[in-house]
């Protein structure tokens, strides 16, 4: 995807400069200091789940899968459709996708925004 190294799963999803920039952006926005493991399986194994409400835990578990899904989509569009998003567009794709996935959760009748605000107040 970056056209600078051979494509492997680990390079594509974790270590490619495009993937790394997305991971760094997401981690910095949520206040997470992160050292990227070498392998995808290690990322998934060490992705800690915070305490708190079940819905927050469910949304938190979605983050690494959503990042990888968006990177995979971007790779396929670059490879097969000759389309290339900017990093800002890729970030937007991630946050939009994560929110769409989160909407599928039951938030006790609240929208995602109100639920997250009420969760932070508790």
Image (tube, helix red, strand yellow):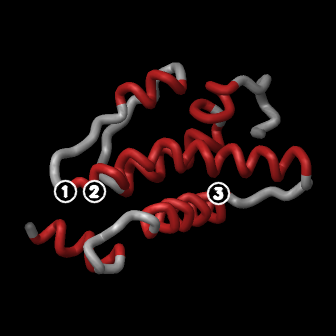
**Foreground residue among 53 and 27:** 53
| Numbered label attached to residue 53 | 1
Q: Which residue is drawn at 38% across and 51% down?
A: 28
Can you tell which mark lies on residue 56? 2
Q: In which quarter of the image is the N terminus?
A: top right
Residue 3, located in which quarter of the rendered image?
Answer: top right
Looking at the picture, tell me which residue is in the foreground, 122 or 110.
110
Q: Is tag 1's residue or tag 3's residue first in the polypeptide sequence?
A: 1
Decide if residue 101 is on the left or right side of residue 78. left
Dot 2 crowding, Cα within 10 Å, few <14, some 14–19, many 20+: some
Q: What whole-number distance in Å separates the C-alpha atoms at marks 1 and 2?
A: 5 Å
Crowd band around label 3 with a 10 angstrom C-alpha radius: few (<14), some (14–19), many (20+): some
Q: Residue at x 45, y 66 (%)?
A: 104
Q: Is residue 56 left or right of residue 27?
A: left
Q: Are marks 1 and 2 in contact (CB under 8 Å)?
A: yes
63 to the left or right of 71: left
> Dot 2 lies on which element?
helix
2 vs 3, front mark = 2
Q: Is mark 3 on a helix, strand or loop?
A: helix
Say if 81 sits above or below 65 in the image. below
Label 2 to label 3, Cα distance in Å?
26 Å
Name the residue at 53% across, 50% down.
66
């Amino acid at each position: 995807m970056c056209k600078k190294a051979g494509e492997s799963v680990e390079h594509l999803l974790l270590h490619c400069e495009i993937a790394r920039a997305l991971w760094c952006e997401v981690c910095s926005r949520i206040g997470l200091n992160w050292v990227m493991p070498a392998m995808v399986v290690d990322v998934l194994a060490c992705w800690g789940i915070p305490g708190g409400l079940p819905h927050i835990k469910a949304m938190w578990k979605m983050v690494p899968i959503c990042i990888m899904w968006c990177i995979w989509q971007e790779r396929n569009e670059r490879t097969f459709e000759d389309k290339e998003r900017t990093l800002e567009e890729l970030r937007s794709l991630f946050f939009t996708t994560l929110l769409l996935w989160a909407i599928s959760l039951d938030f006790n009748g609240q929208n995602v925004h109100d639920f997250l605000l009420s969760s932070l107040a508790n």
